[in-house]
Image (cartoon, rainbow, N blue to C red):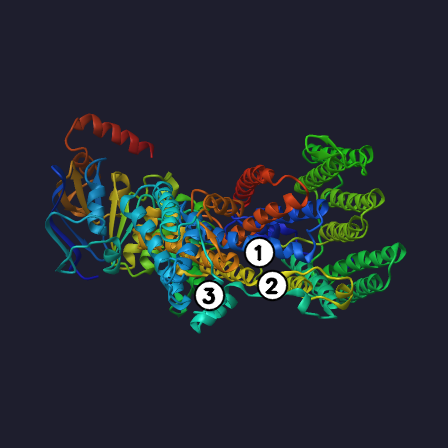
Amino acid sequence: MTDKPVLELNNIGKFYGNIIALKGVTTEVLAGKVTCVLGDNGAGKSTFIKILAGVHQHDEGEFLLEGEEVRFNSPREALNKGIAAVYQDLAMVPLMSVWRNFFLGSEPTKGVWPIEWIDKPKAKAIAKAEMAKMGIDIRDTEQPVGTLSGGERQSVAIARAVYFGAKVLILDEPTSALGVRQSGVVLRYIVEAAKRGLGVIFITHNPAHAYPVGDRFLILNRGESMGNFAKSEITQSELTQLMAGGAELEQLQHELEAAMARD
Amino acid sequence: MTPSTTRVADATAASAAGGDERLAYRGVFARILVRPEIGAAIAAVSIWIFFWAVSVPFGLTSGAASILDVSATLGIMAVAVSMLMIGGEFDLSAGAATGAFGIITLLLVRDVTGEMGGAGLSLWFALPLSFLLAMGLGLFNGTLVNKTSLPSFIVTLASFFILVGSKLGFAKLLVDQIQVGKMNDLAIFSEDRASDKGYAFFNRIFAAEWERNLHQWDSRDAFYTFGVVAGLTLLVIALYELRFRRKETQNMLGLGVCLAGIVLGLVGIFNLHNTRGTQGDVVGAGFIGFGILVGFIGLAMWRYESLNDRGGLTLTADASRPLILGLVALAASFIAARYFDSQNSEDIFFMVTEQGLRAILFVGLGATAAVFLLISSSRAGYTSQTARSAVLMLTALLVAATAFFIRAESVTPKFRTQVLAVMLVLAALMATWAVTTLLFAERRSPDDKAERLGRTLVIVGSSLAVMGVVARMLFVVQAEIDAGAPPSKFSVRILWFLGFTAACAWVLARTKFGSWTFAVGGNKQASRQIGVPAERTKTQLFMLVAGAAWLVGTLLAFRLNTIQASTGDGLEFEFIIAAVVGGTMLTGGYGSAIGAAIGAIIMAMAKQGIPSSRWNSDWRFVFLGVILLLAVIANDFIRSKAEAAR
């Protein structure tokens, strides 16, 4: 993969009225690498992802996509430029079938306007094949997404983003609602997606999930960047310390170490 | 039994063939039950049978024509409203809008000269103009809902009042009346103006009628019998194809047996057609019954794998409880039929006559018994196929016994012959099913070939049956003319209804817009995030409803010639009820256009059936309330069962 970053952020800031939601955030995302964004609740992770995905716009700083300054007005625009976000709530419609969810908003069609219809056999076949590439065998793509497990739903969302030619894949807390084994499965998809040449932004509050898969770590606390490190520059425990924002460090560290030992 | 060439271990091993072992294969019944419109379809058939039993017009062509006519205008709106509801919104202005666009069209074509009050436009301009106004209403509702993020319930409630008020206000202001007319003035006064302003043309499009008595076709009944018998046979074959596991090598002896069954059945049908009188009926019915049994067992022998592990004849407590309840209910229904006097037509209780009470008790208890017996057979099947088949066979025998009981107890010919015939065929099919499910193995893995064939058979079979019934409704034979056939007229409104429903069903199932409709109703936030134009989709749905209101308003204007200012007011809830009865979820994201159409037919049957059963039509609303409640509960129950079965 090239060394030139797909996505670059310089001193990005965002205000809601007089509330500073995000300030001075700088990082870069390389193709084929996983950039982890870590932070506790309220650290500004959601704002960060929403700026990247075009839901909100930044108020200061530079947002460069492949070297060009960009500003997205809608999620659709970001998606068209190759930035796909997989949200915590997964952006799925539980009552709809797997293949419909897979192609939602970008259905392959046959026929000429106004008589256009979805190419159902093609859509089903692609959905099945793409899921298989991620290592998931969906036997019946007609089953509603609501009947899948959390990890499988994540994999549908990731496979969808990969298929639609995303250059940058943003994953918002993909492991937060999952059990240990399912989290492992999703982490594998993250590595898989990066191997296929995507720049992955993995947002989490769990250093134990971030450290094994991440190549670069951006740490946020109360809307501010606490630093931006390559994997070689930081250890997992330092990561944890930074995330906690220096408060009651000793005690927190012990608690976390104990917690991680249990994992 | 025939020795099967390959003795594969039974179904449980099938999942070893590959795939996710946690994902159970859904059998044919589970897949039918998961359709949103299934509850409505069952309800429609039951209600039709109910009114057919208690009133005269049901089952006559004239009755069918008027039910379809009433359901047409209701159904077009119900289908549009159900699409909007799938998209997660309501439109309370939909009812008032139907009248409003009728009035607008009428005001636009009324003559300006003299004291008529109106624009005096040609229909060629008036109809597109009022359609544009309809699009405007939809745009207004949709934009307001999107921009304000208020519940559509409130926004369209406001539109409702605005429409109701404007209808009255403008009608009084411009015409000085609370009704606006008359469409056919265009034709009546056309000589003065040397033009009917498009009336003849549009009248043909919106109000053409097919007069049955003008269309004679003497081989109609042969076509009807062929269509229905062949159609139903294909449907049952489709059921077999979807249910059973195919054999690797076919058994040609089975094919021979199957053909013998077909011959037996044909002999029976021929016999029924050419004899009149009880004795001939019994012989014919017997041949048909045997034909069904032999034919389908032959079919199964020919194509399907036999079942090895049948289990013993043991009933679990779970299965025997509903069995006992079912038998008790059936006995009670027989006792009720014997106890009450079938000839007494005096009111004995509230508004119900003794004969009415007898019919209600008999049908109600009988239906309860059938449900309990079917539950029992399904539960027995959890442990043993033998037990399931035994209960099913018992049920089939009881259905046959009930058929003869009904014949012995009733005097009207429709019970003595038609009910007997249908119930005996049903009993034969059930008995055949009991035998075949005991002897042959269920398919528990997907089989594309079998599924494609099954689907084709379903389509061909149902088309044949529908064509047969339609032919019977549209044409008269000489005998009916001689007997003085009552005039029945089918209006083009029915075609509009069917066409609109088919178009909407296709859009929902097959197009982007349909997918997006489900998506914005199911999870608006999510669908926006991945690039579905949620606001646009919702606005278009509001415009669809307004467009449907324009169509219905136009149909009404041509049918009634005069539209009252209050026309359509209050009907919006009927549209919503029809949609909900048809399986559409109030919370959005789930539903069906075909279901809503069936829901509208159910409501039309209630409207027609209650007066024609000589009940006070004020009770219609009670009936609607009960139907709504039952439908919602049943749909919810079926859906949760089906989801669990997945």
Toward which corner of the image does residue B297 lie, by quadrant? bottom right
Callout 1: helix, strand or loop?
A: helix
Tell me where residue B195 appears, x and y as whole percent: 44, 72
Q: How many marks?
A: 3
Cβ–Cβ under 8 Å for marks 1 and 2: no
Amino acid type of the residue tagged 1 in the rendering = Asp
Tell me where residue B34 appears, x and y as whole percent: 55, 48
Q: Nearer the viewer, residue A49 or A233?
A: A49
Q: Earlier in the sequence, mark 2 or mark 3?
A: 3
Q: Earlier in the sequence, mark 1 or mark 3?
A: 1
Residue corresponding to mark 3: B186
Which mark lies nearer to you, 1 or 2?
A: 1
Amino acid type of the residue tagged 3 in the rendering = Leu
Callout 3: helix, strand or loop?
A: helix
Q: Earlier in the sequence, mark 1 or mark 2?
A: 1
Alpha-carbon neighbours of circle 3 within 10 Å: few (<14), some, or many (≥20)?
A: many
Q: Nearer the viewer, residue B78 or B295?
A: B78
Residue corresponding to mark 1: B69
B239 up-or-down from A212: above or below: below
Q: Which mark is residue B459?
A: 2
Which mark lies nearer to you, 1 or 3?
A: 3
Which quarter of the rendered picture does the N terminus of chain A lie within? bottom left
Q: Residue furthest right?
A: B279
Tell me where residue B27 appears, x and y as whole percent: 60, 51
Residue at 41% across, 53% down = B545
Is residue B577 toward the left or the right of residue A171 in the image?
right
Residue at 38% across, 69% down = A113
Whether labels 2 and 3 belong to a single chain: the reply is yes
